[in-house]
Image (spheres, helix red, strand yellow):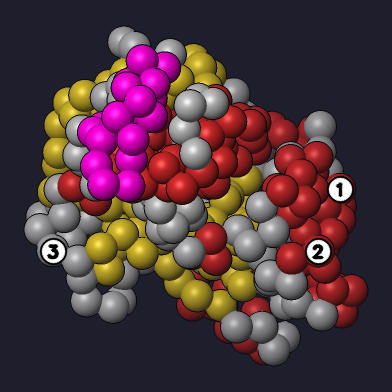
Amino acid sequence: MLALQALTPDRLAAAVPEVTLAEARKLVAQVHRGEPIAASGSIRRTAADAVRAATQVPAIEVVSEQASQLDPFVKYALASAGDTFEAVRIPLAHADRFSVCVSSQVGCALACAFCATGRLGLQRNLAAWEIIEQVRIVKARLPRGRVHGVVFQGMGEPLANLDNVLAAIEVLSEPCALGIDARAITVCTAGLPSGIRRLAAEAPNVRLGISISSAIAEHRKRVMPIADRHSLDDVLAAGAEHARTTGHAPMWAVTLLAGVNDSDADAHALAARAQAFGDSTGKRPRISLLDYNAIGGADPFTRSTRMPAFRDVLGGAGLATHRRYSGGADVAAACGQLAGR
C-alpha cells in the first residue's frame, strides 16, 4: 500500500481515481495535521473510503530523544524495519524557528574519514515517507514555533538516493502538506556530479551544499575516497551548472582537520577555486567552515587550531566565510557524529 504522507495531491489523485484533485488537497492536509482520513463537507465519503483502502500512514519508532545540555539541539534516534537512523532539531537565529537535519540512508557507502556514518557502510536507502516522517516527528515535538527549513546532511549521501529525496522534497515543500519553502531546503553532497545536475533540473528552488574538504586534490583524496571517482574539477563543474540553472550560490563546507587540510596552502587553493567559480557563474560560493567533531573509537583526527588563520587567508582574498556552529556534541548530534546510536 502507498504511504499517504509521502504523496502530493497530484500523486494521490493519480493513484486513487475516485478522488478529485480538490479532495486530494484536503486529504493530504488532513494527514499532515495528524487527523484521521474522514469525509467532510468537501470530501465525499466514497473518496475517503477509497483512500483508506489504497493507502496507509506508516510510522517510525522514536527510540530516544536526547536534548543537548550545551545548546538547544535535540537528537532523535529513530527505528524503521529494524534499522536505526537519526535526525537532529537545529535552532535557528530567529526565535521559535527550527531546521531539521534529516538522514537519507541507513549508513553510507562513501566512507568519508571524518564522518562516523561513513564507518557503518551502506545498509539501505530510506524511503521517501521515512525521510518525511523525520520532519513530522520533530514538528510534532516542538514545544512552540515551527519547522522553517530542512537540511539533508544527516546519515547517508542524499544524491545516492535521489529518487526518494526528490519525492520527499515535493511533500516537504507542498503547501497542503508540510509547507516548507523549497529555498529553505538544502541538499548536501560529498560530490556526485550527475546527481547535482539532476537536482538542478528537478528541484531548482532547493539549495545545494558541497563538502569540499580541501581544494588540493591529494588532501581531499586522503579523507574522501569518492575523490578517486569524481575529481573536484568534475564536482565543481556540476556545481557551476547548478548555480547557472537555479540562480542559487552553493554552500561549500570544509571541516578543518589538524595537519590535514588546514594549512595556508589549503586556504589559498580554496580561495582560488571560489574566485574562479564566482567569475564563471556570477555566484560566489558561501564558504562554511566547521570545527572537527570527534567520532570516537580510534579517532584519526584532531580539531584544528588554525581556524582564525584559515579565515584570514580567505578574507584577504575578498571572500566571506561563516564559522558554522555545530551543536549537540555532548549527545553525538554534531556534524559528522551521527551513527545510529
**Residue type, mark 3 in image:** Arg
Compared to residue 336, the image places residue 147 above or below, namely below
Which is closer to the viewer, label 3 or label 1?
3
The tag on residue 49 is: none
Residue 46 highlighted magenta (yes or no): yes
| Label 2 sits on residue | 245
Which residue is at 58% across, 50% downward? Answer: 188
Q: Nearer the viewer, residue 212 or 94?
A: 94
Packing grade of label 2 (10 A; few <14, some 14-19, many >=20) is some
CA gap, disc 2 and disc 1: 17 Å
User: What is the residue that sits farthest to the right in this orientation?
Assistant: 280
**Drawn side of residue 330 relative to residue 280, left or right:** left
Residue 334 image offset from top left, x and y in percent: 33, 49
Kindly indicate the quadrant of the structure image that contains residue 93: bottom left
Which residue is at 63% across, 31% downward? Answer: 163
Query: Residues in magenta?
Result: 37-56
Lower sequence index among marks 3 and 1: 3
Which residue is at 32% across, 47% downward? Answer: 42
Kindly indicate the quadrant of the structure image that contains residue 253: bottom right
